[in-house]
Each structure stands twice: as C-alpha cells, then as structure tokens.
Image (spheres, grey):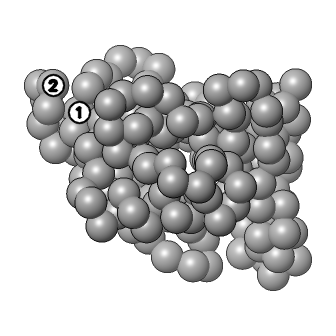
C-alpha cells in the first residue's frame, strides 16, 4: 500500500452493529496502522453535533479531519479530531480488542464500549460506562473482554 490508498476498517460493536470505514492509508508497521480521513460535510456536521451534545467540544466547533492510530498489541486506538485547518480539537480512544489485519488493506477492531476523551487543555473524560455495564450484564461481551476493557481504562487514565 502507498500513502493515500484506501483501507477498510471493519469496526464491530458487539450486539449492536458492524460499520465498515474507508480511510486513507498513512503508514503501517509492526505496532500500528495510521490512517487519515477528511470528512464529507454531512458527516462532519453530524459528528460535530454529537461531540457538542456530549460536552466534548464547544458549540460551533466543527470536526473536519480525523487521524487514527490502530494498535496491534494494545486494547485501544487513538483518534485525533481536528478542525478543517488541521488544528486539534481533542483526542479520543475507543477501548477494544487490538486491531487485526484481515488482508493487505483490510483490518478489524472490536469495540468494548468504553471510551476516553482528552481535551487539548488536559481535561480527561471517561465515557460510556453505562453502555459498558449494560454489555457486561447482557453478556454481549465476555468476562475476559470486560476485564481487558477495565484494565485498559485504568492504564489510559493513569
């Protein structure tokens, strides 16, 4: 693959859905896959509204770019939410099973419901404990997956 090629990420939310994201390839090595996505206007508006409603960014802010790092040996990813000019809005991590490579340009990540937001000013928020608790109680994720998610959250917060 070369920089800018399309890669496909199967993003699984157990018991809920599987989305396939097409992102632009930046780099790949033994530790991670890095991608870039300039968002279409409709997705930028929808995602920005969601971030505002969760209190993660100020009203009127707009996400234009997402740079992602998918880790092969860590139970989380790192998303950099940026304005269209490239300036940073914040960092977001989905806690989940390490990404796996399915083919040359195909990857898969299973989300384990917990998320973290880090603002540029250093404010850290733990997100979606309610969804995680529902998934554990409903046996949507296994006890081993739940332990992995809790341990990852502790590591990230620490």
Q: Is residue 12 visible?
A: yes
Q: Look at the image and tell me in which quarter the C terminus lies.
A: top right
Q: Secondary structure at mark 2?
A: loop
Residue at x 50% of width, y 29% of height: 88
Q: Secondary structure at mark 1?
A: strand
Task: Bin the neighbour count of mark 1 within 10 Å (Cα to Cα): few under 14, some 14-19, many 20 and up.
Answer: many
Residue tagged by mark 2? 3
Give x and y (percent) for residue 48.
Answer: 48, 57
Q: Look at the image and tell me in which quarter the N terminus lies.
A: top left
Mark 2 vs mark 1, CA separation in Å: 5 Å
Residue at x 29% of width, y 51% of height: 39
Which residue reaches farthest front?
Answer: 60
Rendering quarter of residue 15: bottom right
Give the label on residue 45, or none.
none
- Tell me if residue 69 comes above or below residue 11 in the rendering: above
Give x and y (percent) for residue 151.
Answer: 84, 39
Relative horizontal placement of residue 47, taking residue 137 as reference (left or right): left
Give x and y (percent) for residue 116.
Answer: 72, 43
Q: Nearer the viewer, residue 70 or 145?
A: 70
Q: Is residue 144 visible?
A: no
Q: Nearer the viewer, residue 115 or 72?
A: 115
Q: Nearer the viewer, residue 88 or 136?
A: 88
Which of the two discs, 2 and 1, labels the residue nearer the N terminus?
Answer: 2
Relative horizontal placement of residue 10, taking residue 37 as reference (left or right): right
- Tell me if residue 70 comes above or below residue 42 in the rendering: above
Residue at x 79% of width, y 36% of height: 124
User: Disc 2, disc 1: CB below 8 Å?
Assistant: yes
- Tell me if residue 17 comes above or below residue 144 in the rendering: below
Give x and y (percent) for residue 150.
Answer: 85, 46
Task: Bin the neighbour count of mark 2 within 10 Å (Cα to Cα): few under 14, some 14-19, many 20 and up.
Answer: few
Residue tagged by mark 1? 25
Relative horizontal placement of residue 74, taking residue 101 as reference (left or right): right
């Amino acid at each position: 693959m070369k920089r800018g090629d399309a890669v496909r990420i199967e993003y699984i939310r157990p018991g809920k859905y599987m989305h396939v994201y097409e992102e632009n390839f930046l780099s790949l090595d033994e530790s991670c896959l890095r991608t870039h996505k300039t968002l279409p206007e409709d997705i930028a508006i929808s995602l920005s509204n969601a971030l505002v409603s969760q209190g993660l960014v100020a009203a009127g802010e707009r996400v234009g770019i997402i740079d992602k790092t998918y880790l092969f040996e860590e139970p989380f990813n790192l998303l950099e939410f940026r304005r269209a000019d490239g300036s940073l809005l914040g960092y977001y991590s989905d806690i989940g099973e390490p990404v796996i490579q399915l083919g040359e340009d195909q990857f898969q990540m299973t989300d384990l419901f917990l998320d973290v937001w880090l603002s540029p000013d250093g404010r850290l928020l733990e997100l979606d404990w309610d969804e995680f608790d529902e998934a554990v109680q409903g046996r949507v994720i296994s006890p081993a997956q739940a332990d992995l998610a809790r341990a990852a959250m502790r590591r990230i917060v620490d």
